[in-house]
Image: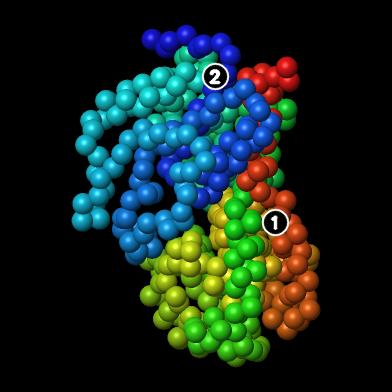
């Protein structure tokens, strides 16, 4: 049985899958807002696991990876519902299925939350926490960056819609990350007053500081990677999978009239890498594959680039767009990307093309590569637009939701 909530200070539990830089910055900023405004609120983050903190091998990008960003766990209270061990790159846990979830609920129950912020619905743990909250009358705030997906099968889409209709009707408030995410939630009949804007964001100040430090060395970094100063560098920074459509970019570059000064810079890795390299060679497209780069290394590649091309047929909120915009890069983006209608304003800080339309993609690369002034103007606008999409806005959205739910009040 749940123990009685004590009067006085209110408590918010936050469930997240594991520590990642794009979420932990929200939690630390939320704690700062609470302290600054002297709100009667205690916050504790419950991570599903510590998996992201382990050195482990990811088959999709063919890389052994561990985040090298410091301070992921600083600035807020947290706990891990489960802890994993890694042996020879194999991740396992020493806990039985049923006891795992009893253990998780017990930890949250001891905190005695008045409200729970749940990130996503992809894990069984998130559903168990959701059911626990509903059973005991704890308010639920839901945050997820999902957007509509045209390529999803009809039967799967209908089953998902029925299940999520029930799920969302049981939530009390929502955080939406972009206009497509907002429309996705509105399609489920969620009242507009229950929706609060918590943008898909990155640490803008970190990346802008990185750019300020590194832009003076742009020519040096280019020379280091055997890139000519006259080259127009088109950055593709993503997993090399079919969903990301890297072959569209290669085909577009192969059809450019003046492709000699165009260089495709591929940052990342994945199952399509060998095919991509072979196609570049076959079509005589100049390219550079530098492999996967961690958070501390990626800034150099934004600095030496002239434009970011993101070509996916589905991508709810790729943070690479936000990061590139902090480096004053124009963006050429597919229309099927969730945050594009908000972050990429056509003919202002970049171009939006119909997904899979290689001819449009080629045209926009040509436009930018032949006009340095246009590129610089677009880049300036990118920086101005992304500056409004911050982690502090996410923190405020959570506070707004808590006031809406009367967990917090103005007294």
The residue positioned 27% from the left and 25% from the top of the image is 99
| SS class, disc 2 | loop
Q: Position of residue 217 (x, y in %)?
A: 59, 79
| SS class, disc 1 | helix
Mark 2 highlights which residue? 114
Q: Position of residue 153 (x, y in %)?
A: 49, 46
Give the mark nearest the N terminus, 1 or 2: 2
Left or right of 392? Residue 239 is left
- Front position in the image: 381 or 391: 391
> Which quarter of the image is occupied by the C terminus?
top right
Q: Where is residue 344 in the image (x, y as percent from the top left)?
A: 71, 59
State which quadrant residue 181 falls in: top right
The residue positioned 50% from the left and 20% from the top of the image is 113
Above or below, 241 against 168 in this view is below
Residue 224 visible from this viewpoint: yes
Residue 357 visible from this viewpoint: no
State which quadrant residue 67 falls in: bottom left
Spatial CA distance of label 1 from label 2 is: 34 Å
- Front position in the image: 109 or 178: 109
Mark 1 highlights which residue? 386
Mark 1, other Cα within 10 Å: few <14 / some 14–19 / many ≥20: many
Colouring scheme applied when the structure was drawn: rainbow
């Amino acid at each position: 049985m749940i123990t009685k909530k004590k009067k006085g200070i209110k408590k918010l539990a936050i469930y997240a899958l594991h520590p990642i830089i794009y979420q932990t910055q929200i939690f630390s900023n939320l704690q700062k807002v609470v302290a600054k405004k002297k709100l009667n609120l205690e916050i504790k983050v419950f991570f599903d696991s510590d998996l992201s903190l382990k050195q482990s091998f990811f088959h999709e990008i063919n890389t052994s990876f561990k985040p090298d960003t410091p301070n992921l766990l600083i600035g807020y209270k947290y706990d891990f519902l489960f802890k994993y061990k890694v042996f020879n790159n194999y991740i396992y846990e020493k806990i039985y299925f049923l006891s795992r979830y009893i253990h998780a609920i017990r930890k949250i129950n001891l905190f005695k939350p008045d409200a729970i912020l749940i990130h996503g619905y992809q894990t069984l743990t998130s559903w168990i926490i959701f059911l626990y909250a509903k059973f005991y009358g704890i308010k639920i705030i839901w945050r997820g960056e999902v957007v509509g997906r045209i390529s999803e099968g009809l039967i799967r889409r209908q089953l998902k819609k029925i299940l999520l209709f029930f799920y969302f009707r049981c939530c009390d408030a929502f955080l939406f990350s972009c206009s497509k995410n907002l429309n996705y939630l509105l399609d489920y009949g969620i009242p507009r007053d229950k929706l609060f804007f918590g943008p898909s964001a990155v640490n803008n100040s970190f990346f802008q500081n990185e750019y300020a430090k590194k832009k003076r060395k742009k020519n040096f970094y280019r020379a280091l990677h055997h890139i000519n100063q006259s080259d127009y560098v088109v950055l593709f920074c993503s997993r090399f999978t079919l969903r990301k459509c890297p072959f569209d970019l290669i085909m577009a570059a192969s059809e450019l009239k003046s492709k000699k000064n165009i260089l495709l810079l591929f940052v990342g890795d994945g199952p399509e890498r060998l095919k991509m390299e072979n196609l570049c060679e076959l079509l005589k497209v100049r390219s550079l594959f530098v492999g996967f780069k961690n958070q501390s290394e990626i800034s150099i590649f934004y600095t030496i680039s002239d434009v970011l091309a993101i070509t996916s047929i589905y991508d709810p909120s790729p943070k690479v767009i936000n990061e590139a915009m902090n480096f004053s890069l124009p963006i050429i983006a597919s229309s099927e990307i969730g945050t594009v209608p908000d972050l990429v304003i056509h003919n202002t800080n970049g171009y939006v093309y119909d997904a899979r339309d290689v001819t449009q993609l080629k045209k926009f690369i040509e436009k930018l590569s032949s006009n340095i002034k246009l590129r610089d103007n677009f880049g300036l606008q990118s920086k101005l637009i992304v500056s409004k999409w911050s982690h502090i806005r996410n923190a405020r959205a959570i506070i707004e939701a808590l006031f809406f739910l009367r967990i917090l009040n103005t007294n």
